[in-house]
Image (cartoon, helix red, strand yellow):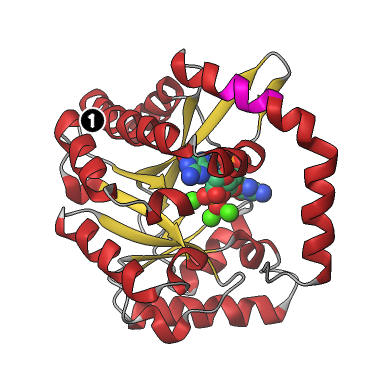
Amino acid sequence: VKREGRGGYRFFSEELNISSARRVRMEAWMRNALANEGFMLHYQPKQELSTGRITGMEALVRWPTEEGMIAPGEFIPLAEDTGLINPLGRWILNRALSDAVQVARAVGYPLQIAVNLSMRQFQRPGLSELVQQAIERSGIDPSLVELEITESMVVERVDEAISTMRSLRELGVQLAIDDFGTGYSSMAYLRNFPVNTLKIDQTFVRDLVSEDSNASIIEAVIGLGRGLGMQVVAEGVETALQRRLLEQAGCHVGQGYYIGYPVPLNELIELLKHAKAK
Ligand code: C2E
Ligand code: CA
Ligand code: CA
Ligand code: CA
């Protein structure tokens, strides 16, 4: 049963009706893209707010097709439904980690690489072996790898989720809770999760300037994360003012269009070379 209530049901069934033909077509395209290197990764820089240094990046999958770029918001759910997320996720992991090694070589210092995991990937047995393999193949220092999971993945079957998180942490990788503050509230569980980083959802950052309540929420979340010894990251930073307010509130890292757009690997390398020269 879906939790969204009536609105959620309606949206769910409409989506199925409207797009079933498109979904069938897309699934075939997706298989084809997987077999032919048809997906690509963009990288969005992450900035340490106190120093202005770019210390890491998030891998975001892109799918260029004849119909233009299809957004991950559309094809990731379909990949989840069809199971294609498993080979796709494996490709993303391997590519992101080896690209991160390439970035470090090109710019002369190591950067952290954040990779999104989907629900189905997270719940599938053998995830840590997959991550281990990607680490070995790329030769990356595992402490530079951060895996992003969402609250909804960990609030169901909490014990299983915690043991999965532990086995990932044993590899030496970092874990982040993405989109924090949306949907489910896991405040109570949070301290039991072996998580290093909280990523504040962009909806809170968006209205930071106009709505006092959002400023309070952000300050509370930053305080919570810091209090638990976590790194706090804000996503969706689009203006200088948002960036400054976040820095003042004690947020460690910022990510968003103001700091940098998601770009292909070669553009990220250029950007980093310039940032370093400054
Ligand atoms: P997310 O992980 O929360 O990623 C952040 C999204 O916000 C990205 O959208 C990014 O392009 C966008 N964004 C970055 N800065 C700004 C900003 O300043 N303002 C605004 N309005 N948006 C910003 P994108 O790339 O379309 O990805 C959407 C979602 O798709 C991601 O949300 C994530 O849940 C999923 N996704 C993307 N790449 C992957 C992947 O490689 N694997 C998996 N499993 N999911 C992915
Ligand atoms: Ca993310
Ligand atoms: Ca997010
Ligand atoms: Ca999101």
Residue 200 at x, y percent in the picture: 52, 65
Judged left or right of residue 166, residue 121 is right
Q: Is residue 7 above or below residue 270?
A: below
Q: Is residue 221 above or below residue 11?
A: below
Query: Magenta stretch mostly in which secondary structure?
Result: helix
Q: Is residue 130 left or right of residue 209?
A: left
Report if residue 67 lies within the magenta region: no
Image point (20%, 30%), residue name: 138
Outermost bottom residue? 188
State which quarter of the image contains the C terminus.
top left
Residue located at (32% from left, 59% from top): 175
**Residue 119 seen in this snapshot:** yes
Question: Taking the image as drawn, is residue 117 in sight?
Answer: no
For residue 129, above or below residue 38: below
Q: Residue at x 15, y 59 (%)?
A: 170
Residue 132: x %, y % from top left: 18, 43
Look at label 1 and name its amino acid.
Val
Quarter of the image containing the N terminus?
bottom right
Disc 1 C-beta below 8 A from ligand 1? no
Q: Is residue 91 left or right of residue 145?
A: right
258 or 64: nearer the viewer? 64
- Residue 157 sits in quarter: bottom left
Residue depicted at 77% across the width and 54% down the height: 12
- Across and down, in percent, residue 15 comes to 79, 46
Q: Based on the picture, tell me whether residue 27 belongs to the magenta stretch.
A: yes
Q: Which residues are magenta?
A: 25-30
Q: Which residue is mark 1?
A: 101
Quarter residue 111 falls in? top left
